């Protein structure tokens, strides 16, 4: 009897072993950061208490002596006075509507680390209204002209004037039809042919946003593979729909999502072994900061932000992914909503020389109007089964293929084929890498603790010495006439129509802003201060707050 029990136990253990091994492989393929551990990150987010620094401490949270704190305070007050006077009308309208617009309340609160946020909001208010866009500049309600580094969330690849033309010409072509939905404007036929040629894929579906395009691509991958899980790489943004945004920001825990390490053989092993993976989502923008979330200044509590783009390494990674996905019947989806048409006219597939099974596009493709697109292999795009009529994969959307969007897209695609437009892409990497290198050399020469890293026209700012105040740079940059999005120095997005003169003007302003910030003492360095010590201090403050 005993022998039987042991035998059964051994059999059971042997049966469990492969499962345990697979579980272990999965754990090893998770990035050690919080971005790699959605559940833990959510738990910590629930626990982290709010606190803010009092006025008398806020300029010396790194232990700076009184004289340095006084310089910082004077600099802050000078900026506050400048903002009040220069941005009066823009800020006034923003303040009036902010209590009524939840999005504005959110972005307003998360421009800088939360401990400083209330103070900054009281004194250094940034306006959210703009009156005009001209060339590479934006003009606010007070008539101030700033160089645009927001890139309109990445939509603005070619320059705002280009999109004004797409929209105006598109509207002219669509106006006889108006907003007829469910039936197609002829522009749809043109767009489909062009998108097939660009993507190298068989079929196309139109949606209203990048988020929806990704939803649809993942749903189809699940439908056709009969598998449940999607793989995304640590830190990658794919829109705000549940399954692609596990962790902080989503009230639900992750279910059918694996978040794996980017650029890591351990992830390939998981793809090789598991049988429940329907698709792998790749956002090539992550090449700039693999395994890290989109950098925003609200998380700039120290100088740990890292970025750097290695085209050869990322290309090799995509090739490895392509191979394992082909071998394992996993659908490889390139999410090109951000980078498509920015890196190359044929998108990231063209730029990296790797083909996906499905590609999502959005942002700029709408010619300035909202859109999401899925291109895919015929067998993956089919929404029903010929032999099982009730087994369908449902997708609709009232406004998909809207005539005005389709005609603006048509103009965009027509113009994209013009030699002058194609010429813009020639030597693009070299041009923007050289610009970044020039700016970095100037920053180094001026002994400023700031650098930039870039993936073409997508830039992020990094900091070379530990500091608690790097987030102040965004306010100095604005004061010098550079318009940033609400994520601040985490993401600067240039359009391709920036001339050398325009860029030099931005670089001059950038250096001037950093010089002023340095002169105001924000980068004074406490002896021996490290990023780790800063994070430990924040942990202690949080614990004290929690327990006190
Ligand atoms: C790579 C990527 N995928 C999806 C999305 C979501 O697109 P949308 O904001 O149009 O829903 C974004 C938006 O920034 C994105 O960058």
Image (cartoon, rainbow, N blue to C red):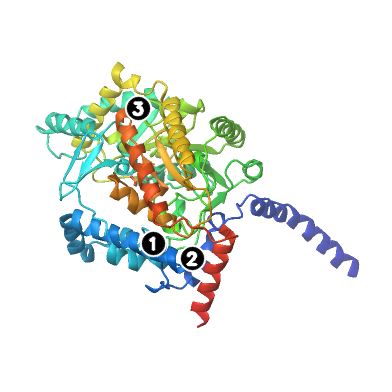
Residue under label 2, please give it.
64
- Asked if residue 468 is positioned above or below residue 140 in the image, the reply reads below
**Quarter of the figure with the N terminus:** bottom right
Q: Are marks 1 and 2 in contact (CB under 8 Å)?
A: yes
- Left or right? Give the position of 334 relative to 78: right
Q: Are marks 1 and 3 in contact (CB under 8 Å)?
A: no
Q: Residues within 10 Å of mark 1 (few under 14, many from 20)?
A: many
Ligand 1 quarter of the rendering: top left
Dot label at residue 195:
3
Q: Position of residue 8 (x, y in %)?
A: 82, 63
Q: CA distance from mark 3 to mark 2?
A: 57 Å
- Asked if residue 487 is positioned above or below residue 7 in the image, the reply reads above
Q: Residues within 10 Å of mark 2 (few under 14, many from 20)?
A: some
Farthest residue in the left direction? 176
SS for tag 2? loop
Q: Position of residue 344 (x, y in %)?
A: 40, 26
Residue under label 1, please give it.
72
Foreground mark, 1 or 3, reads 1
């Amino acid at each position: 009897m005993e022998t039987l029990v042991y035998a059964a136990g051994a059999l059971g253990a042997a049966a469990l072993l492969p499962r345990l091994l697979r579980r272990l492989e999965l754990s090893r393929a998770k990035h050690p950061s919080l971005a790699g551990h959605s559940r833990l990150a959510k738990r910590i987010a629930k626990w982290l208490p709010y606190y803010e620094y009092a006025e008398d401490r806020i300029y010396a949270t790194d232990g700076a002596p009184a004289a340095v704190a006084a310089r910082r305070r004077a600099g802050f007050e000078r900026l506050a006075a400048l903002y009040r006077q220069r941005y009066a009308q823009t800020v006034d309208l923003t303040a009036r509507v902010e209590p009524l617009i939840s999005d504005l309340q959110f972005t307003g609160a998360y421009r800088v680390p939360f401990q400083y946020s209330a103070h900054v909001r009281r004194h250094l208010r940034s306006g959210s209204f703009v009156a005009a866009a001209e060339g590479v500049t934006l003009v606010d309600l007070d008539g101030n002209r700033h160089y645009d580094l927001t890139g309109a969330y990445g939509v603005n690849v070619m320059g705002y004037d280009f999109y004004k033309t797409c929209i105006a010409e598109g509207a002219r072509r669509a106006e006889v039809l108006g907003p007829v939905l469910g039936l197609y404007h002829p522009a749809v036929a043109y767009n489909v042919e062009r998108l097939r040629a660009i993507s190298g894929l068989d079929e196309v579906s139109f949606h209203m946003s990048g988020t929806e395009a990704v939803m649809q691509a993942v749903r189809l991958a699940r439908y056709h593979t009969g598998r449940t899980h999607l793989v995304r790489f640590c830190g990658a943004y794919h829109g705000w729909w549940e399954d692609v945004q596990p962790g902080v920001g989503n009230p639900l825990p992750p279910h059918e999502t694996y978040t794996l390490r980017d650029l890591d053989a351990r992830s390939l092993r998981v793809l090789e072994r598991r049988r429940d993976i329907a698709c792998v989502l790749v956002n090539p923008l992550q090449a700039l900061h693999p395994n890290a979330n989109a950098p925003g200044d609200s998380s700039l509590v120290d100088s740990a932000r890292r970025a750097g783009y290695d085209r050869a390494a990322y290309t090799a990674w995509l090739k490895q992914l392509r191979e394992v996905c082909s071998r394992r019947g996993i659908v490889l989806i390139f999410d090109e909503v951000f980078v498509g048409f920015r890196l190359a006219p044929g998108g990231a597939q063209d730029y990296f020389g790797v083909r996906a099974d499905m590609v999502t596009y959005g942002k700029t493709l709408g010619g300035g109007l909202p859109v999401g697109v899925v291109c895919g292999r015929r067998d993956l795009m089919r929404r029903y089964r010929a032999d099982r009529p009730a087994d369908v994969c449902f997708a609709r959307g009232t406004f998909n293929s809207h005539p005005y969007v389709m005609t603006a897209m048509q103009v965009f695609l027509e113009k994209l084929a013009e030699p002058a437009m194609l010429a813009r892409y020639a030597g693009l990497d070299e041009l923007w890498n050289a610009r970044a290198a020039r700016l970095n050399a100037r920053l180094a020469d001026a002994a400023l603790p700031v650098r930039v890293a870039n993936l073409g026209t997508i830039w992020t700012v990094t900091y070379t010495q530990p500091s608690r105040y790097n987030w102040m740079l965004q306010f100095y940059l604005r004061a010098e006439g550079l318009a940033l999005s609400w994520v601040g120095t985490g993401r600067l997005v240039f359009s391709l129509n920036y001339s050398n003169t325009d860029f030099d003007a931005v670089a001059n302003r950038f250096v001037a802003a950093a010089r002023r910030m340095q002169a105001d003492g924000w980068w004074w360095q406490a002896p021996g201060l490290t990023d780790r010590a800063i994070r430990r201090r924040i942990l202690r403050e949080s614990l004290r707050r929690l327990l006190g």
